[in-house]
């Protein structure tokens, strides 16, 4: 059984071009007990961040300027990160669901989503990250 401390100590990065959304989501996760949450609105910075300061879970908007969420996922596969990274993709456009899951996202949420939808997705994604069985994870 997984220790809850492992889950709440996981490193989570939120990537959304809307700073208000990313900041609010970050504060909500911290309020819910996640201790290592950060965010960026710069999707182009994500591949570099994964090398210099890797995370366990990426909450990734699919529709962004610069690099789309899908392009971010492809870049992460290209740089061959050495740890398992779970991705929860989200967008206001349901058409991103199939392509994001095909690219390796373990979950897809339609914006605007409720925390009650996000929490189970986070728990499932992080369980896969810290578990020896890691299907649908980038770097697996």
Image (cartoon, rainbow, N blue to C red):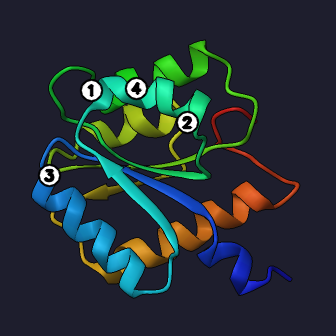
Residue sitting farthest toward the top = 78
The Cα atoms of the two marked residues, 3 and 4, are separated by 18 Å
- Closest to the camera, between mark 1 and mark 2, is 1
Cβ atoms at labels 3 and 4 below 8 Å apart = no
- Can residue 13 be seen here? yes
Judged from the image, the secondary structure of the residue bearing numbered disc 2 is loop
The picture places residue 6, in percent across and down from the top left corner, at 73, 74
The Cα atoms of the two marked residues, 3 and 2, are separated by 25 Å
Q: Residue at x 61, y 15 (%)?
A: 79
Q: Which residue does the numbered mark 3 point to in the structure image?
A: 19
Cβ atoms at labels 3 and 2 below 8 Å apart = no
Q: Which residue does the numbered mark 1 point to in the structure image?
A: 68
Q: Which residue does the numbered mark 2 point to in the structure image?
A: 104
The Cα atoms of the two marked residues, 2 and 4, are separated by 11 Å
Cβ atoms at labels 1 and 2 below 8 Å apart = no
Position of 96 relative to 1 (above/below)? above
Q: Is residue 63 left or right of residue 84?
A: left
């Amino acid at each position: 059984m997984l220790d809850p401390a492992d889950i709440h100590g996981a490193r989570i990065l939120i990537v959304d071009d809307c700073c208000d959304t990313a900041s609010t989501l970050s504060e909500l996760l911290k309020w819910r007990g996640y201790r290592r949450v950060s965010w960026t609105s710069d999707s182009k910075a994500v591949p570099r961040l994964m090398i210099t300061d890797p995370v366990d879970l990426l909450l990734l908007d699919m529709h962004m300027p610069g690099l789309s969420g899908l392009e971010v996922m492809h870049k992460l596969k290209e740089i061959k990160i050495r740890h398992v990274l779970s991705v929860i993709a989200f967008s206001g456009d349901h058409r991103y669901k199939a392509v994001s899951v095909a690219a390796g996202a373990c979950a897809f949420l339609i914006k605007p989503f409720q925390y009650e939808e996000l929490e189970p997705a986070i728990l499932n994604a992080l369980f896969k990250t810290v578990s020896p069985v890691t299907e649908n994870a980038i770097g697996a």
